[in-house]
Amino acid sequence: DAEITQSPRHKITETGRQVTLACHQTWNHNNMFWYRQDLGHGLRLIHYSYGVQDTNKGEVSDGYSVSRSNTEDLPLTLESAASSQTSVYFCASSSSGTAQETQYFGPGTRLLVL
Amino acid sequence: QQQVKQSPQSLIVQKGGISIINCAYENTAFDYFPWYQQFPGKGPALLIAIRPDVSEKKEGRFTISFNKSAKQFSLHIMDSQPGDSATYFCAASKNQAGTALIFGKGTTLSVSS
């Protein structure tokens, strides 16, 4: 069955380190998204991509970067981790089209920055 | 500026009761309004969605009511069950290439037995 996976599921890192969170989907979806979820803030969009080589900044993109070299993967990089980036990160994908296609979410990565 | 405002932040309902979660939006260009459901430790999943050409959409015990003039929409869960205990997010988007879903801050629903 097609799916979307995230790795690692849990990560502890230190302030200042570079961290990369992986997201892989097997639906052949063109659209992929990264969100962070924090208590009281809901789901906030970090970056999104509507196809290979396409990337766009979301609401809270500072300190994060993404690159889309193939359809299946959209890795999220924290260039220099900060304690404020402690959060649960969700990746999602949807088929071609606008933001009105159903988004399928991964299981999440819980990141702790010490 | 918060484009989609959701209330309440948390909700406790007795088993068999009606759960109501409300959302309001600012941008009149929004024309797609989904609700996502998230169980603890899981990613959100689409529950039900509505477009502004109808005022109500029902799927089983879940109903979206939409008021275009007031720029408000709400989720009603009839005969609420303990298995409905989850976090619910409303969202909105425009039918425009390159844009993204805007989510509300979420409502944590607890249905007591």
Image: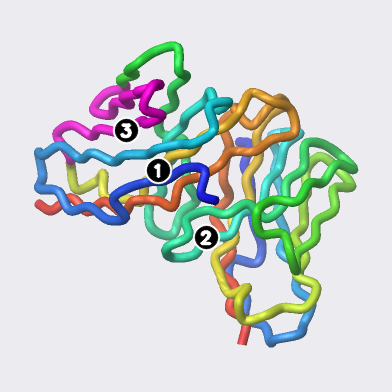
Tell which subunit mark 2 falls on: A
Q: Residue type at mark 3?
A: Ser
Residue A43 drawn above or below residue B61: below
Q: Nearer the viewer, residue A79 or B7?
A: B7
A64 sits to left or right of A102: right
Residue at label 2? A37
| Residue at the image point whose x is 46% and y is 36% from the top | B25
- All told, the count of numbered labels is 3
| Residue B74 lies in the magenta stretch | yes
Under circle 2, the secondary element is strand
List x then y, in percent, for residue B72.
37, 31
Q: Using the image as rendered, state which of residue B1 and residue A65 is in the foreground.
A: B1
Q: Are marks 2 and 3 on the same chain?
A: no
Disc 2 vs disc 1: which is toward the camera?
Answer: 2
Q: CA distance from mark 1 to mark 3?
A: 14 Å
Q: Quadrant of residue B16?
A: top left
Closest to the camera, between mark 2 and mark 3, is 3
Q: Secondary structure at mark 3?
A: strand
Magenta-drawn segment: B59-80
Left or right placement of residue A20 versus residue B107 in this view: right
Q: Which residue is mark 3?
A: B74
Residues at marks 2 and 3, CA–CA distance in whole angstroms? 22 Å
Tell me the residue at 75%/60% (across/down).
Answer: A76
Is residue B18 rendered to the left or right of residue A6? left
Which residue in the structure is indicated by mark 1? Answer: B37
